[in-house]
Image: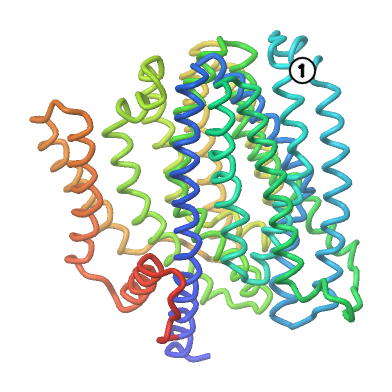
Amino acid sequence: MSEVDRAEQVKKTSIMIARHGGIVIIGSIISSVVRFLTQVILGRALGAEKYGLFALGFSLFSMAGQVSQLGLTEGIIKYGAVYKTENDQSRLKGLLQQAVIFVAAAAVVVAIMIYYSAPYLAMDFFNKSELVPVIKYFALSVPFFALGMISAASARAVQSITDYTLIQYVWHPVIFIVFLGATFLVGPNISNAIGAFVLAWLLVFIFSAVSMLKTSPVFRPGIRPVYETRHLFRFVIPVFLAKWLPLLINNIDKVILGKLVLTGDVGIYNAGSKVAVQILIFMQALNLIFAPIVAAHFHDHKLEELNALFKTVTYWTVALTLPVVLWMTLNAELIMGLFGSEFTTGKNILILCCLAQFISVCTGPLEYLLIMGRQDLHLINNLVLAFINVACNIILINKYGVFGAVLTLGISMFLYNFVRLVEVYILYRLFPYNGKFIKVFVIAVVVTALALLINKFLSDGFLSAAISFVILFGGFYWLLNLWGLDEEDRAVVLLVKRKVGGIFMRDTSS
């Protein structure tokens, strides 16, 4: 392939990422806004202590839900994308049928184990008897959650992006907040909150199952499934372990905090960390579209095109995320105050968590490059990081309390992403940076200085937040456009604008 043809192919693929990414970004924004409002409602209604109990139960639920998936969501994405490209309906049907059966069985077993071990976990480990019903309620959601994620992965593998976005991002947070409001009219207590959470996942499971049956032709009669169980599990076993370990890392801090500090401190830390995770919205949206492309490019040995797309995805991830990070850090006290006055002490937690998460943003879709190419190495990385993370959490939380958990998060994010960056370069000569990144950070410094200067003369917190929002977002993208966008950047921006302006409008230019 000539350089001209290669450049044109990269441009077309970048535009496709933007087209699908626009849909996912909108779904992600809806999800992030609704989830944030849900956390605010929970924090204000339950208070820091009961909110901390909810956070501990949710952390155990998250780890159990990931275990139940057995890594098969990634298997669906990797092989589903290849089978779709090759139009191999038989192997695609076999893949999806196996995933549903294995995950359903695993999820039921895990849920039963969590349910009946709730008294031991609550009283013998956490020394909190009031945590028993919380753990039991969350355990009931595990099968519905795991099967919903299998449905989402199936939609993603066959590039049914609208269905994927609804299942992955929209349905649960929207249904949950509606149920939460309805149950809180009866009484704002933790039992009603978790009951609304369980019912929401039950409905998501029903909706996602119906959606998958309607949209996926592989479940229609007449297609004979072909099963490649050994081949599939050779891939998903290391991926399963590697995928579960980051989830352990993301939740073990709350578990150790629940063991070593007051429940109220867990609630304040959870509020800050939950808000900070929202900065990953653009990275997750673009990476999810990028993942099947990674699988296809590795399959076809198109590493040069992959390297160009790697740079494009990372650049736009950073450019879209940086204003969010800046706004959150400048308005941390106001944001934490939305949860209630007792949460404002966690403003520094929010700032530090945002900076720690931004490290991952700056390195782009490294995880998918390793999962699709070297899943065994990805597993080794996660095993080492999990050991370091758990050890640091125990040592630093014992010494510094909540700030020990934040410090551990920063250390983990730096080590993990630096090691993966080096590995991807050595193995594939893939590198996510070019000269375009310089202007992004120069512009960030300019708009931040301007926002700080103007807000210095304002005493009203909400007015200050509104003005800094206009400066950091409007000023940032105006200067970015003024500095100059290349042809590929303009094509990406145009498509995102079209999707934001009219998500269901037919694109006549493609």
Q: Is residue 384 above or below residue 152?
A: above
For the image, the number of numbered tags is: 1
Q: Tell me which residue sits at (22%, 66%) in the image.
A: 481
**Residue 416 % position (x, y):** 56, 42
Q: Is residue 178 left or right of 229 when viewed as pictured?
A: left
**Residue 224 % position (x, y):** 91, 78
Which residue is nearer to you in this view: 279 or 30?
A: 30
Q: Is residue 222 left or right of 289 when viewed as pictured?
A: right
Is the C terminus in the top left, top right, bottom left or bottom right quadrant?
bottom left
Which residue is nearer to you in this view: 134 or 84?
A: 134
Q: Is residue 212 above or below residue 101?
A: below
Task: Specify whether residue 308 is in view.
Answer: no
Q: Is residue 458 left or right of 8 when viewed as pictured?
A: left
Looking at the rendering, which quadrant does residue 340 occupy?
Answer: top left
Check disc 1 and give the amino acid type: Leu
Q: Tell me which residue sits at (61%, 21%) in the image.
A: 190
Q: Which residue is identified by label 1?
A: 121
Q: Tell me which residue sits at (77%, 17%) in the image.
A: 121
